[in-house]
Image (spheres, rainbow, N blue to C red):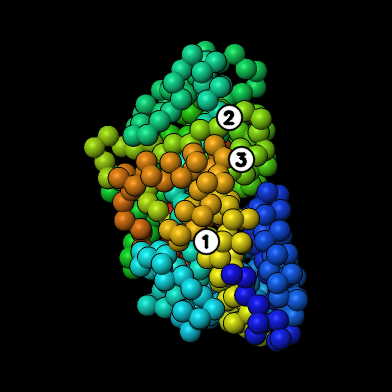
Amino acid sequence: MIGRGALAQEPANIRMIWWGGDERSRRTEAAVELFRQANPGIAIQTESMGWDDYWARLATQVAGGNAPDFIQMDYRYMFEYARRGAIRPLDEFMGKELKIADFGQANLDSCSMDGKLYGGNVGVNAYTLLLDTAAWNEAGLEPPGHDMTWDTFAEKCADFTKTNKRPRVYATADGSCQEALFEAWLRSQGKALYTPDGTLGFDADDAARWFAYWAEMRKASSCVPADVQALYKFSPESSPIVLRRAATDFGHSNQFVAFQTLIDVDLAITGTPVMEGGAPAQYFKPSQLFAISSGAKNPAAVARLINFLIREPEGAKILGLDRGVPASPEIRDVIMPELDETGRKVVQFIEDMSPRIGQLPPSPPQGAGEVNDTIIRISQEVGFDALTPEEGGANLVDEAAAILKRG
């Protein structure tokens, strides 16, 4: 049931911020409006933007003492913001404003640090390959699938280049800028982005080999050239597959619905490449968390809004799968009958990946967000031949280590 009663009698103002594309904004605004109607004593101001702009704006607001009350938080950044005291523990609201015990311990732990809960898990997701199956079929090739090795992926993309009939379309986007894809590549070799003590889990040679893999793909015209990849602003709208420049792209499973909404061909979803005989490359993580600013004047009201969006059927049905497969079994059962083919593909993907996933990695250290920005920048410098893969690998490790040391 939508919360009425006490909240309707207590004037409260909530500022809410999230990142995402147009479809996410449409769904979120609709759910928030339903909550407003049931709680007329609560004024909610909303603000959204793309990933690229989001973290800089949030950091500025937090530093200026003007943080939003309701913050959409990423797993990578949660630990940094929690350690800085920018978001508050939610344990005091459990069983009252937050009725999310049925999410299960694993999903609660994924949003926790030092035994304290810092966010409501909005959805379960994993990293994926997104596929324009028609483009692959027209080239006379089977699209990439589960358990494909990195070598086979490169070979398949090279074959696409030879038989493709679509002008200006490449086999794949350039994945060298994708931190989560780099992490999957490292994990399949028994390595990691970060160690449990917060240092780098890879070295310059690992990073150089990563950049070299994609340099070879560009050289073979198997992936989009650097100038096309540079148009990507880490939103579905700007992705090479949506711009019809690539038959394969990358994203988290919760983004699949948004990608499909933006393109008039049927997309498919599968796991990332693996190393033959290697360790599991992927893991399940919270797609996003809904967190409360430590400066929120009405934190209980914010907690009720979070609960409405992730645990109450009225709100959760509107959000759908845009932010991931709901953690609550009851909510999954509620929304399943209403899912279209696209939604069912996402749920099926999570089920297919279940036997293939590894452990959730150690919590990212403070500075991980800045390291991600560094990966993006250096991948572009290598892509435009301003750096060799070896120079890019060395620069990435040097700069990342300095960022982590600075904390």
Residue to which mark 2 is pinned: 266
N-terminal-most mark, 2 or 3: 3
Q: Residue sitting at 47 percent across and 53 percent down?
A: 333
Residue 48 seen in the figure: no
N-terminal-most mark, 1 or 3: 1
Q: How many marks?
A: 3
Which quarter shows the N terminus?
bottom right
Could you tell me residue 73's position as x and y percent? 56, 65
Q: Secondary structure at mark 2?
A: loop
Residue to which mark 1 is pinned: 122
Q: Secondary structure at mark 3?
A: helix
Q: Residue sitting at 59 percent across and 82 percent down?
A: 300
Res. 398 image quadrant = bottom left
Residue 351 seen in the figure: yes
Which of 395 and 275 lies nearest the eye of the viewer? 275
Which of 387 and 210 lies nearest the eye of the viewer? 210
Residue to which mark 3 is pinned: 259
Q: Secondary structure at mark 1?
A: loop
Could you tell me residue 97's position as x and y percent? 54, 78
User: Quick check: marks 1 and 2 in contact, CB under 8 Å?
Assistant: no
Residue type at the position of mark 1 = Val
Could you tell me residue 111's position as x and y percent? 44, 68
Other residues around mark 2 within 10 Å, as few (<14) / some (14–19) / many (≥20): few
Distance of mark 1 from mark 2, alpha carbons? Answer: 26 Å
N-terminal-most mark, 1 or 2: 1
User: Quick check: marks 2 and 3 in contact, CB under 8 Å?
Assistant: no
Q: Residue sitting at 46 percent across and 45 percent down?
A: 347
Other residues around mark 1 within 10 Å, as few (<14) / some (14–19) / many (≥20): many
